[in-house]
Amino acid sequence: MRIDAENLTLHLGGRKVLDSVSLSLGGGELVGLVGPNGAGKTSLLRALALLVEPTSGQVTYDGTAAESVPGGERACEIAYLAQNAPVHWPLTVERIVELGRLPYRGRAEAARDREAVEAALRAAGAEALRHRTADTLSGGERTRVLLARALAVEAPILLADEPSQALDPYHQLGTMELLQAQARNGTGVLVVLHDLALACRYCDRLVLLAEGRKIGDGSPREVLNDRDLERAYRIKALRGSHEGRFFVLPWSKIGPPTEDAPG
Ligand SMILES: Nc1ncnc2c1ncn2[C@@H]1O[C@H](COP(=O)(O)OP(=O)(O)OP(=O)(O)O)[C@@H](O)[C@H]1O
């Protein structure tokens, strides 16, 4: 399956938060969505999943206008892992992951649901947590459980908003390996990341947003060039490569220009 957005513009609270953004994601791709705080990354993910209606522009799933795809079908085709998703009830981890199968209610065999839940728990390294309730989990454990819930959907498209948040380095690498494995199995994965080193290490392609506009779309080396890092993040970064992979390491801030600075 592929998802395409064309010239998406979105206003929220009277402000333009996305400005004519176009983006394509195909099955088998792991694409990193990067950009500074407030750039519009979450808004773009939500617009792609039709959780928010764009002011103008169009989203298509396999060439069909997204809004004409019935909600139940959409929920099976697009798994969305929200940033900081709250879990309000003291549900067990197993139950939370089972919620990922809700879109299939009446469509899948119980045994198939069970299989998907077990596979997701295993993949996210959350099996040992299955009988714990959400309110007893650490931030990183909760992140892994919510990722497992998204995986249990077994959707051909996975939109993940900062799935490495609150994870230690071991689990960050584990999560990115998991997303990479999903992509290799044919899933189209769009992942919001703040960690540029992780983004370079694992993503086939990066999309860089700044102030609601797309300013880069290409390989990590192309997108995270000095000029656009300065423009988007106001940082300077060290650049290198290891085992054939390009990486950047954020190194220093660029201060605001002083009033009496020349130029
Ligand atoms: N419901 C809303 N009403 C008004 N403004 C909103 C609303 N939701 C988001 N915004 C604004 O839209 C802009 C983009 O927000 P968004 O959450 O998409 O950014 P982001 O790139 O995901 O940021 P972060 O990296 O901080 O998570 C921000 O300036 C935010 O304050």
Image (tube, rainbow, N blue to C red):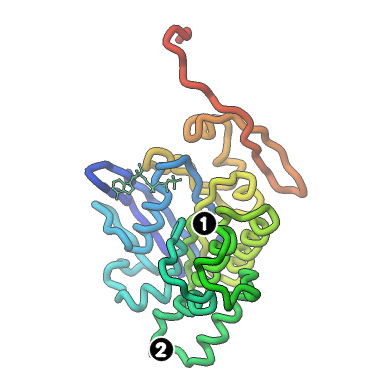
**Which amino acid, by three-letter code, is at mark 2?**
Arg
Look at the picture and state if 181 lies above or below 32.
below
Look at the picture and state if 175 lies above or below 10.
below
Look at the picture and state if 6 lies above or below 221.
below
N-term-proximal mark, 1 vs 2: 2
Residue 107, label in figure: 2
User: Residue 153, can we see it?
Assistant: no
Q: Residue at x 56, y 27 (%)?
A: 253
User: Residue 24, can we see it?
Assistant: yes
Crowd around label 2: few <14 · some 14–19 · many ≥20 (10 Å):
few
Looking at the rendered structure, the number of numbered marks drawn on it comes to 2
Q: Position of residue 194 (x, y in %)?
A: 54, 46
Q: Position of residue 247 (x, y in %)?
A: 67, 42
Position of the C terminus, as image quadrant, is: top left
Q: Residue at x 56, y 71 (%)?
A: 186
Residue 191, label in figure: 1
**Which amino acid, by three-letter code, is at mark 1?**
Val
Closest to the observer: 53 or 68? 53
Q: Are marks 1 and 2 in contact (CB under 8 Å)?
A: no
- Secondary structure under tag 1 reads strand
Closest to the observer: 227 or 14? 14
